Image: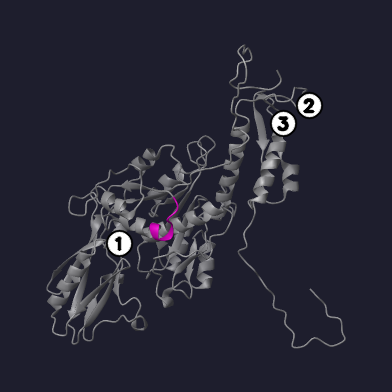
Amino acid sequence: MPISFSNIPAVMRQPLYWVEVDPSMAGNPIQPLRALIAGTMITTAGPNKGNGTPDVPIPIGRQMDADHLFGMGSELSLAFKAFFANNFGTEVWALPVAEPVAGTASTGTVTIATAPTEAGTIHLYVGGRHVSVNVGMTDTVTQVAQAVMDAINADGYMPVTAAAAVGVITLTCKWKGTSGDDIRVSDSYYGTIGGEMLPPGLTITYPPSNMLSGGAGVPVFDNGIAALGEQPFEYVSMPYSDSNSLLAWETEFGFGDDGRWGWARQLYGHIFGAKRGLYSDLILFGETRNSGLVSILGFEETAPMPFFEWAAAYTAKAARGLMNDPARPLQSLHLEGILPAPGHDRFLLSERMGLAQNGIATQATFADNMPVIMRESTTYQKNLYGQSDDAYELVTTLATLAKLIRNQRQAITNKYPRHKLADDDTRFGPGQAILTPKMAKAELVAQYRFDEYNGLVENVTAFKQNLIVERDSSDPNRLNVLYPPDLVNQLRVFAVLAQFRLQYNRGVDTQVA
């Protein structure tokens, strides 16, 4: 009985026609590639308190769910607004964490220094959220402050609450922790060309550097990470860039025995973040990190929106692009709904080059006044011995490798789930559930050609020459494989030497380079 059946008994003695269905040659690799947004929910009692449970991952299908569970205007609620603005097709979950124990909320004061002499509109921006306040020519500073307070508090998505007294508006972040210090307050973002200017006579003073301050405490992610279990999450928005938070997530997604990229778990995934700072500060920060699993997008100090919204938008666009094709570069993808820094403050080309060389992903803003991803660098820069290395420098490298491994795993586990293992040239009957090293090698080459057709790899000839499949010398039930894919590269630089002439000499052969 050379054909290997799985279910029909070899001793079947009843008529007549019996069929067992075998899907092993039909399936295609389908992997749910989920996104995950980690962040702080409002756990302090009050009107903005979220109704969700900290440290318990939960799928989020619409903005109203995020508002209800995590508190409208919370860090996590606003992160979901940024994500949904850039990606509506990826399954996304939340990992809410509680406000830091004994933490404090960020605060800042906005002072109406002088009253208006003419009627007009204040175009105020709090964390990048625009609120317009109409004022009259006879309004006092106290009345203007009251109007500003009312306008801020009327917008549930504001990350702050406002209180006013004698011309001074005190803004308080809705949650506790250092992330509130990244909330920027300013006015007239679009300037006179955009129709935004303060009413004549009105002057306003803002907190130092236009930022809230005084927030203390960083959320602890340990319990939340443990609660993820073995659920797969491919694209993670983790906005915090402090060493403890990054270490916790890098360990969870690492290459070690217990990591998601390790041999035992094989879950894979990528972590995306964002960080505000001066060019020099971002360079110094980049020198302290070295992980191929983490990509942190650097943005300018005067950009209106906080880092957790930048991180969510970056994650959303990365997920959208990499799900379609993990090998395509993310350059030129827009970060919808994110306000860039004013034109004179944006990073120069030379600065973006320096950031990319020091493990910081870069963005730029062009004619449409919307930030776009320029280079999806990871923080990886050096090997274990501290020598410069670019093996994991780009997000697309590990994204492509994860796709290849999953394709291969699906093919092997589908086609050979209960096979016997024999030496090459063993004479067995057709239809036997037996695998030999040569058969396995042929399967891997066929899969490689499939991946080549789909634009993930190249150079199949070199792959075949370097592919090794052999039985283990100590364990006759084990097959060992050296799998050497040549990952396809990306068109990131198109360099042209414009060797012009004023006129070619007539009748003289020209040299073509």
Q: In this view, does 67 lie to the left or right of 238?
A: left
Q: How many numbered circles does the render carry?
A: 3
Q: Residue 181 carries which label?
A: 1
Residue plotted at (40% across, 71% down): 341
The kind of residue tagged 2 is: Asp
Give the crowd class for mark 3: few <14, some 14-19, many >=20 residues within 10 Å.
Answer: many
Residue 90 in view: yes
User: Does dot 2 land on a helix, a strand or a loop?
Assistant: loop
What secondary structure is marked by label 3? helix
Q: Which of marks 2 and 3 is nearer the N terminus?
A: 2
Alpha carbon separation for disc pair 1 and 3: 59 Å
Residue 85 is inside the magenta segment = yes
Q: What residue is shown at x 41% (from left), y 70% (from top)?
A: 340
Taking 475 as reference, is 72 left or right?
left
Q: Nearer the viewer, mark 1 or mark 2?
A: 2
> Is tag 1's residue or tag 3's residue first in the polypeptide sequence?
1
Amino acid type for the residue under numbered disc 3: Pro
**Residue 78 horizontal/vertical position (percent):** 32, 58
Point out the stretch of residues depicted in magenta.
Answer: 84-90
Mark earlier in primary sequence (1, 2):
1
Return the x and y of residue 411 as percentages of the image width and height: 62, 37
- Distance from Cα at disc 1 to Cα at disc 2: 69 Å
Amino acid beneath label 1? Asp
Which residue position is annotated with label 2? 425
Query: In which quadrant of the rendered image does the N terminus lie?
Result: top right
SS for callout 1: helix
Q: Which mark is residue 437?
A: 3
Percent x, y for residue 274? 42, 59
Considering only vertical position in the picture, is 472 above or below 385? above
